[in-house]
């Protein structure tokens, strides 16, 4: 099953093998989604004025919005959106022109702005705001608006990051088999 996938200026989204894109999600333009990733109800991913790259086994949960910033005189690359492997993007998250590493968990309703960099193995608490250009260091929990470094992640939390991604790989396998449109 795949959602509302649209080309923009002749560029079509590229979806990897075994992805799940909910029927109500919209993906437009220069967007690549890696294998075994999943995009849940009411997500919008817009690769129009720049590109979006999403790695493997990453999940983008319900109602999240992913967009980019255009190239301008003072910013020759603009801000594409880069998301690594095994990332959990919680419900209602806003990701705009930022760079997210591997094995990151982004809590529900977080906002991450242009030019922010989230290194590998980070948890961002629900409702956090990551301001433009800020770097979040690998191995730490960040919470708040604007985010502050809270503490290093425990080993259990580090172990949970790929587990969370894998839970969603299993869930999307189940959806691929068992979700049916009935009206
Ligand atoms: C931040 C988080 C990881 C919990 O961390 P934690 O250290 O176990 O938190 P605790 O419950 O021990 O609380 C520690 C303090 O942080 C506060 N806190 C917890 N979550 C917070 C958040 N998202 N933002 C700000 N403060 C938060 C607690 O109120 C507590 O404050 P206190 O010390 O003044 O009482 C968790 O609350 C969270 O936001 N998880 C994201 C879950 C999610 O959205 N998943 C994706 C969808 S499935």
Image: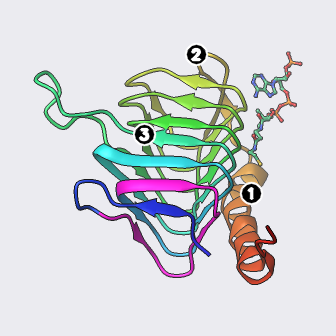
Q: Which sits earlier in the primary sequence, circle 2 or circle 1?
A: 2
Question: Which span is picked out in magenta?
Answer: 12-29
Let me know if residue 153 is in the magenta part: no
Q: In the rendered view of the protein, which quadrant contains the C terminus?
A: bottom right
Tell me the residue at 73%/59% (across/down): 164
* Label annotation for residue 146: 2
**Mark toward the start of the polypeptide (3 vs 1):** 3
Front in this rendered view, residue 146 or 4: 4
| x, y percent for residue 52 | 37, 51
For label 3, being within 8 Å of ligand 1 is answered no
Provide residue 130's location: percent of width, then percent of height.
53, 25
In which image quadrant can residue 125 be found?
top right
Quadrant location, the N terminus: bottom right
Instruction: Please give the label number shown on residue 82.
Output: none
Q: Nearer the viewer, residue 55 or 162?
A: 55
2 shown above or below 139: below
Q: Residue furthest left?
A: 73
Circle nearer the viewer, 2 or 1: 2
On screen, residue 146 versus residue 77, left or right, reads: right
The CA span between labels 3 and 1 is 27 Å
Q: Which mark is residue 160?
A: 1
Secondary structure under the numbered disc 3 in the rendered image: strand
Tell whether position 19 is magenta: yes
In-image side of 117 versus 80 (left or right): right
Q: Nearer the viewer, mark 2 or mark 3?
A: 3
**Residue under label 3:** 67
């Amino acid at each position: 099953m795949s959602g509302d996938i649209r080309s923009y200026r002749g560029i079509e989204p590229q979806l990897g093998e075994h992805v799940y894109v909910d029927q109500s999600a919209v993906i437009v333009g220069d967007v690549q989604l890696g294998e075994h990733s999943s995009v849940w109800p009411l997500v919008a991913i817009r690769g129009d004025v720049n590109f979006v790259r999403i790695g493997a086994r990453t999940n983008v949960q319900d109602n999240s919005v992913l967009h980019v910033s255009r190239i301008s005189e003072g910013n020759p690359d603009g801000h594409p959106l880069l998301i690594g492997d095994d990332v959990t993007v919680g419900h209602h998250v806003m990701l705009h022109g930022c760079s997210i590493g591997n094995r990151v968990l982004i809590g529900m309703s977080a906002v991450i702005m242009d030019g922010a960099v989230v290194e590998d193995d980070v948890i961002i608490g629900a409702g956090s705001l990551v301001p433009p250009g800020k770097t979040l260091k690998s191995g730490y929990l960040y919470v708040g608006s604007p985010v502050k470094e809270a503490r290093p992640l425990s080993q259990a939390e580090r172990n949970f990051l790929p587990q969370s991604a894998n839970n969603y790989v299993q869930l999307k396998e189940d959806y691929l088999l068992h979700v049916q449109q009935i009206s």
